[in-house]
Amino acid sequence: MSTMDETWTRGIVVGVDGSPESYHAFDWARAAAARHHVPLTISHAEAVPVGPVTPVPAYEIETLQDATQRILSSALDRIDHADRVSVHVDAVPSVGAPAPALLHASRDVDLVVVGRRGTDVTRHILGSVSATVAAHARGPAAVVPTGARTGDPERVVVGIGFDDDPAAPLDLAFAEARAAGCPVVLLHTVQQSTRVAREAGAGRMEDVEAALQGLAHRWKELVPDVECRQEVRTGSPVDALLEHVTPSDLLVLGGHRHPRFVGRLLGSVPDVLLGDAPCVVAVAHTARPHAATD
């Protein structure tokens, strides 16, 4: 059974780059920090341009500092007086690519948050900041689309698979639900693509329902004040989750953190949902035994 502590203590970091998408992610991160009573850190990494002839940085430090300060000030200006009192906010500028800065910060916080940007095609390209952070973060990571609700979620939906230990996503889901005062929904999809699978479907569904009830019972013992529901569907996991969630939900997924030299397979369930879900998607990685470090 998980040794979950539903109280966050280390805070949240959010990446801001001056885009509307990143400011929307900042609004969501600020609300999350308020409900968990933890500090919020704004991270902005200013990319350094290089000269046209030799790879030498072509910038003046004052210009870089001014650009960084404008972006951070714009984020801070979005905080009203009440939030300034209830949420401690720091701004941490740096020089370089944003993804490495956020990955470094993910080692020391409860959650790292990024916005989702791009079209249906470009947002699926490997190497985007949101995909990189979700794949490689040392702790939980949340990706915020522009259409997602920025306040407390109405539900926390957890995509449950039985191939991996579900402790990490369930810990995150119940911590968020407890802080937001909303229910958790455990959703598992049974794929019945073959005749044998369809014939065994009734027994399979009963087994899945029993397994979900067992998980709900275990986490309800840890967090008894959170309502937990279970739902089993048939078909594609991606389609089932996309049909189930709304912009007011928080979708929590499990998975393995990917070493940087391995990368991430485009088209996996988490990747597609990170690109297409209308709500905030949080990924809580399950540790691999004897995993290599990077």
Image (cartoon, rainbow, N blue to C red):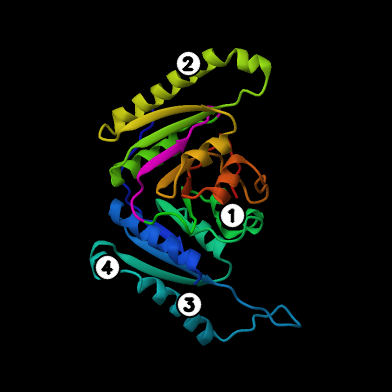
Determine the secondary structure under disc 2: helix
Which label was assigned to residue 206? 2
Query: Which of the marked residues, 3 or 4, is nearer the chain's N terminus?
Result: 3
Q: Residues within 10 Å of mark 1 (few under 14, many from 20)?
A: some
Q: Residue furthest right?
A: 53
Q: CA distance from mark 4 to mark 1?
A: 31 Å
**Amino acid tagged 1:** Thr
Residue located at (29% from left, 64% from top): 88
Q: Earlier in the sequence, mark 3 or mark 2?
A: 3
Q: Which residue is mark 4?
A: 84
SS category of the residue bearing label 1: helix
Disc 3 and disc 2: Cα gap in Å? 56 Å
Question: Percent from the top left, x then y, of residue 45?
Answer: 52, 70
Q: Tell me if 75 is positioned left or right of 46 in this view.
A: left
CB under 8 Å between discs 3 and 2: no
Q: Which residues are magenta?
A: 151-163
Camera-side mark, 3 or 2: 2
Q: Is residue 249 magenta?
A: no
Q: Which mark is residue 68?
A: 3
- Labels 4 and 2: the sequence-earlier one: 4
- Residue annotated with mark 1: 132
Classify the position of the N terminus by image quarter.
Answer: top left
Position of 202 relative to 283 (above/below): above
Characterize the magenta stretch by its predominant secondary structure. loop
Of badges 4 and 2, the one in the foreground is: 2
